Image (tube, rainbow, N blue to C red):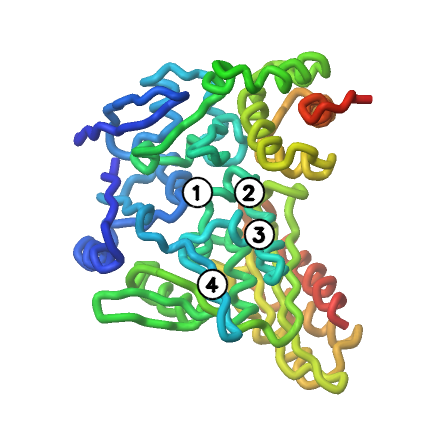
C-alpha cells in the first residue's frame, strides 16, 4: 500500500509533487482516492493529504468568488448566493460524504462524477495551480485539455478556484437514479445572459457525457445571438445529444445518457426562456 | 511496511494506535479497538453503515485514512451509548420497528444524532435528506423516518402523534 504523507506548506507540497511525479496521488477529502485504493489499485507510492494547509476558505470580494481547493461540498451548499453550485453540492453523495468531498477533488473526478466541475465550467472558472515553475491560472477548460495531454498527471497543486459573479442566470440539473446520494447519469449546467430578447452569452456544460465535465460548443452556438424560444432550445438539445460522448457503465448506458443530455438540457434552458 | 502510531481520542478516551500504511479509520475502529458498531458495508462511501463523528462532524470511516484522523476526536455508536444521549433515539427506533436485520442501524443512529444536534426539529424532508447517505435494505425506510420524527418530537419536549 502507498504511504500517507502530509506537507507543511504549499511550497513543500509542490516540491513533493515535482519530486515524485505520477507515483504521488493528491488526496482532498478522500472520497475518490479511498474508493480507488479499496478497489485494490495501489499504483502509487505516496498519497498526499492536504489537511493542515488551510486551503478551504470561501471568499467573495470585488465581484468575484474564490473557493479554496479543499472547501467541502457542505461548505458550498451553504452558499445561498451561489444557488447552482450549492444545488450541485447538495447532490454529491449523502451528508457524511459531503462533509469530506472537496471542490478541488471534484475537478479531478472521473466521469460521471464532476457535478461541481460542470457548474464551474458554466461559470467560466479559472484555477490557481501552484507549480514548480510558479503559479499558473488556466481556465478550467484549458486545464482539462492540458491534463488529458499530460496523461492526467496534475501539473502542480490546485490551491483555489476563482470565477466572476455570473452576469447571466445559471441553472444546474442532474439526472440521477435516486433523489439524493446517487451517481449522476448525466448533469447539465447552463449560464445564459440575454439582452433585448437575444442571447448574448451562453455557456453550456455537460457532465457524464465525456471523460470529464466539458463545455458543449455546438449547443452554445445553437442559442447564441437569437431568441431563447422552443425552437432554439430544441436545436441546442439536439446538438448536445449529437455532440456528446457518454460511456456505458453500471449507472447508465451510453444510449440512455445521450437521451438524457437532450432532455435535461432542454429542461434547464426552458427555465431561462 | 512502515507502522505509524496515531493519537486518537475515541469515545472520550485517549488512545495510541499503531497503523499500517493507508489503513482506514474503519479498520482501526473495528479491528484494533473492537468497536464493531462501525460496519463494513460497501467500503465506497455509498451506504453509510460506517458513519462516525470526527470532531463532532458526521463522516464515513471507510473513506477516512486513519492517519488523516490523527489527533482527532472520534465518536462511534458505542461512545454515544456511554453518555446515554442516544437512548431516546434508540427507544424510538424500537417502538417504530425501525430495524430488521440491524446492519444499517448503528449508522442510522449516528446520522440521526448528527442531524438532531444540528437541527432539533427537522421536517420530514430534512430527515429524508439527512439520512440519504444511509442505505437500509429491509425496512423500506418509512419506519426509520417515523422513528426519527418521533425521537425529534420526544427530545424537543413535544408529545408525538
B59 up-or-down from A119: above or below: above
Q: Distance between the Cα atoms at labels 3 and 4? A: 14 Å
What's the residue at 70%, 64% (across, down)?
A268
Q: Chain of mark 3?
A: A
B29 up-or-down from A267: above or below: above
Specify the farthest residue to the front.
B157
Label 3: state its secondary structure: helix
* Pointer 2 or 1: first along the chain: 1
Q: Do labels 2 and 1 touch, CB within 8 Å?
A: yes
Task: Classify the position of the C terminus of chain A by image quarter.
Answer: bottom right
* Pointer 3 or 4: first along the chain: 4
Q: Chain of mark 2?
A: A
Within 10 angstroms of label 4, few (less than 14), some, or many (20 or more) residues?
A: few
Residue highlighted by disc 2: A93
A33 up-or-down from B74: above or below: below
Residue highlighted by disc 3: A77
Task: Classify the position of the N terminus of chain A by image quarter.
Answer: top left
Amino acid at each position: 500500500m502507498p504511504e500517507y504523507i502530509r506537507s507543511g506548506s504549499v511550497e513543500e507540497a509542490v516540491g513533493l509533487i515535482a519530486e515524485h511525479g505520477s507515483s504521488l496521488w493528491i488526496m482532498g477529502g478522500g472520497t475518490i482516492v479511498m474508493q480507488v485504493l479499496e478497489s485494490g489499485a495501489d499504483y502509487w507510492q505516496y498519497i498526499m493529504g492536504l489537511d493542515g494547509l488551510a486551503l478551504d476558505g470561501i471568499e467573495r470580494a470585488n465581484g468575484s468568488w474564490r473557493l479554496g481547493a479543499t472547501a467541502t461540498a457542505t461548505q458550498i451548499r451553504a452558499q445561498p448566493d451561489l444557488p447552482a453550485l450549492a444545488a450541485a453540492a447538495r447532490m454529491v453523495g449523502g451528508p457524511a460524504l459531503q462533509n469530506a468531498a472537496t471542490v478541488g477533488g471534484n475537478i479531478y473526478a472521473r466521469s460521471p462524477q464532476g457535478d461541481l466541475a460542470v457548474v464551474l465550467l458554466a461559470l467560466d472558472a479559472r484555477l490557481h495551480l501552484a507549480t514548480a515553475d510558479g503559479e499558473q491560472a488556466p481556465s478550467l477548460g484549458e486545464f482539462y485539455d492540458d491534463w488529458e495531454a499530460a496523461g492526467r498527471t496534475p501539473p502542480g497543486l490546485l490551491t483555489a478556484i476563482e470565477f466572476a459573479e455570473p452576469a447571466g442566470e445559471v441553472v444546474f440539473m442532474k439526472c440521477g437514479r435516486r433523489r439524493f446520494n446517487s451517481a449522476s447519469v448525466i448533469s447539465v449546467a447552463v449560464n445564459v445572459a440575454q439582452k433585448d430578447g437575444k442571447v448574448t452569452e451562453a455557456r453550456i456544460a455537460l457532465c457524464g457525457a465525456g471523460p470529464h465535465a466539458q463545455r458543449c460548443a455546438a449547443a452554445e452556438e445553437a442559442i447564441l445571438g437569437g431568441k431563447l424560444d422552443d425552437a432554439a432550445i430544441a436545436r441546442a438539445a439536439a446538438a448536445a445529444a449529437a455532440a456528446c460522448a457518454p460511456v456505458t457503465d453500471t449507472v447508465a448506458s451510453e444510449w440512455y445518457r445521450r437521451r438524457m443530455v437532450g432532455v435535461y438540457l432542454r429542461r434547464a434552458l426552458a427555465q431561462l426562456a | 511496511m512502515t507502522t505509524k502510531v496515531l493519537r486518537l481520542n475515541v469515545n472520550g478516551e485517549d488512545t495510541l494506535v499503531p497503523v499500517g500504511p493507508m489503513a482506514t479509520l474503519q479498520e482501526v475502529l473495528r479491528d484494533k479497538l473492537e468497536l464493531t458498531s462501525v460496519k463494513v458495508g460497501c467500503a465506497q462511501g455509498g451506504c453509510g453503515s460506517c458513519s462516525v463523528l470526527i470532531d463532532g462532524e458526521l463522516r464515513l470511516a471507510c473513506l477516512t485514512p486513519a492517519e488523516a484522523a490523527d489527533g482527532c476526536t472520534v465518536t462511534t455508536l458505542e461512545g454515544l451509548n456511554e453518555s446515554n444521549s442516544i437512548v431516546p433515539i434508540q427507544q424510538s427506533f424500537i417502538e417504530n420497528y425501525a430495524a430488521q436485520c440491524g446492519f444499517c442501524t448503528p449508522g442510522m443512529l449516528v446520522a440521526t444524532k448528527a442531524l438532531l444536534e444540528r437541527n432539533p426539529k427537522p421536517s420530514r424532508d430534512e430527515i429524508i435528506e439527512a439520512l440519504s447517505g444511509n442505505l437500509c435494505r429491509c425496512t423500506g425506510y418509512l419506519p426509520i423516518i417515523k422513528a426519527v420524527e418521533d425521537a425529534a418530537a420526544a427530545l424537543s419536549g413535544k408529545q408525538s402523534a
